[in-house]
Image (cartoon, grey):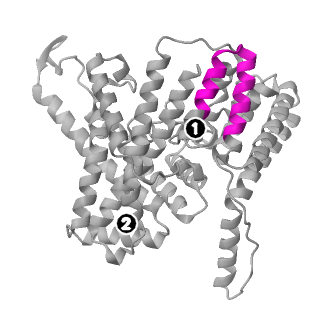
Amino acid sequence: MLFNSHIFWVFFAVVLLLYRGLGHRNQNRMLLGASWLFYGWWDWRFLLLLIGTSVMDFALGRAIGNSTAPRRRKALLIISVCVDLGLLGFFKYANFFSAQLAAAFASLGVNVSMPMLHVILPVGISFYTFQELSYILDVYRGEIRPVKRLDDFLLYVAFFPQLVAGPIERSSRLIPQILRPRRSMPDDFSAGLYLVLTGLFRKVIVADNMAAIADAVFATPAGQLSGIECLAGVYAFAFQIYGDFSGYSAIAQGIARWLGFDLMTNFRHPYLAISPSDFWRRWHISLSTWLRDYLYIPLGGNRGRAAKTYRNLLLTMVIGGFWHGAAWTFIAWGAFHGLLLCLYRPIEKTIARWTAKPPTAQGAEIRPISAGDYEAVHLPRAGIVRAGRQLLLGLLMFHLVCVGWLLFRAESIGQANAFLARILTDFRMTPHASYALGAIAFYAGPMLIYELWLDRKADVLALTESHWLPRGLVYAYCALMLWIFTPEVGHAFIYFQF
């Protein structure tokens, strides 16, 4: 079931109707059954895998929590990690490694027929595997107590709003919400409506309309495209993947709010970032913080010599790239972002100083005029200079991110290189390029302008607290666009394949 399908909203209406009339324990049981139905709708065989790993991690988590023997606790942790990652590797990476091994033998002049698996990747396996791993690791570290009831843990893993594409919820956030009775808050309906409507806009209007442009460009050989057409294809994919993934996360947050749950915010206007570290504080926050807490910091983080910090950054991002898929393009994408983090690291403090707000509310700068005496000097140009620096740094960062998206979307490293060469050498403005750039501005431009306002407010839900008139205009705009400009052919959410 897709969030942008009629069958899902029929399903959710029935779930919500039943949910409101039940007590806490029965609500959890009903949500678990609904979550299994939601997941089994894709393929009931995948449901067996989800339940099996959940039962295993519940039992191992209980055993780790009840044991005081360090060696036994570590052995149980290793079993959980090996089984979870082993299943993920089997379904997601077995064919990739078989193909690479066959290619290695072929380069030596030896033809070897490697076995290839003919299986479908279980939807959402990367997300729920990382969610289970975070629970086991937190129990092992003593940061949480193991869950006592199996049905509560099964719901933690299978909770349907965020099951197949995140956000990757930590046990310390989601499990307490499962264990305690949910109470309706006054703003749950309005916040949920806002998140669902704007999420559908980003998915259906932005992402699906951009998909048509990106797919057409990337399906065409680079030699038949101008550089501007290639660039338009990359821009289109940048907004497609953002609208698609952030839209899903927003809808998941919204329907969870209607059920009394508070899921984490997974995106905070990432294309307004001014540096790589700023980008990763805004993009796929649940994954970036997961990699930070369970990989980067255990590797040593930024402790020790600079060389080790750079090694840890690169290794973390390469693994993050490989998490997305079994292809060299994903590995290259991760390595590219790791390299950006390393290159920007020495100048992060300088960038922060360049873009820092003045110390007084009206843009005044405090200047010493004598020992122990200060005067507030209003400099209107200070705000303009700061805004200009942010704009230039933001444009640079956006285009660096787009280079990464070229690697991410390309069918091969060769196609990515060919597209990049056309972009840097061929500046012809063709009719197709003009149409594509115009469509990008029409569908994605208003979203960017709106996000600039939200970013200044530093609150992703700022509109829900504003006057009814601007709120009504935004809602009417989203509804009108969904009515008029919904593409004839919808697209599955991109991150379902991960």
Dominant SS in magenta: helix
Q: For residue 133, which numbered disc appears in the image?
A: none
Q: Nearer the viewer, residue 440 or 489?
A: 489
Q: Quadrant of residue 379?
A: top left
Q: Residue at x 14, y 15 (%)?
A: 376
- Vertical comparison of 476 with 468: above or below: below
Image coordinates for residue 419, horizontal then vertical, percent: 36, 69
Q: Quadrant of residue 193?
A: top left
Image coordinates for residue 481, horizontal then vertical, percent: 33, 40
Q: Label 2: few (<14), some or many (≥20) within 10 Å?
A: many
Q: Residue at x 50, y 17 (%)?
A: 188
**Circle 1 sits on which residue?**
8
Instruction: Identify the secondary structure beneath mark 1.
Output: helix
Taking 375 as reference, is 214 left or right?
right
Q: Which part of the image, by quadrant, shows the N terminus?
A: top right
- Vertical comparison of 339 with 328: above or below: above
Q: Earlier in the sequence, mark 1 or mark 2?
A: 1
- Vertical comparison of 367 with 286: above or below: above
Dot 1 and dot 2 residues touching (CB under 8 Å) = no
Query: For the residue marked with disc 1, what is the amino acid?
Result: Phe
* Residue 302 makes an appearance in the image: no
**Circle 2 sits on which residue?**
217
Q: Which residues are magenta?
A: 11-38
Q: How many numbered discs sit on the rendered protein? A: 2
CA separation, marks 1 and 2? 31 Å
Instruction: Identify the secondary structure beneath mark 2.
Output: helix
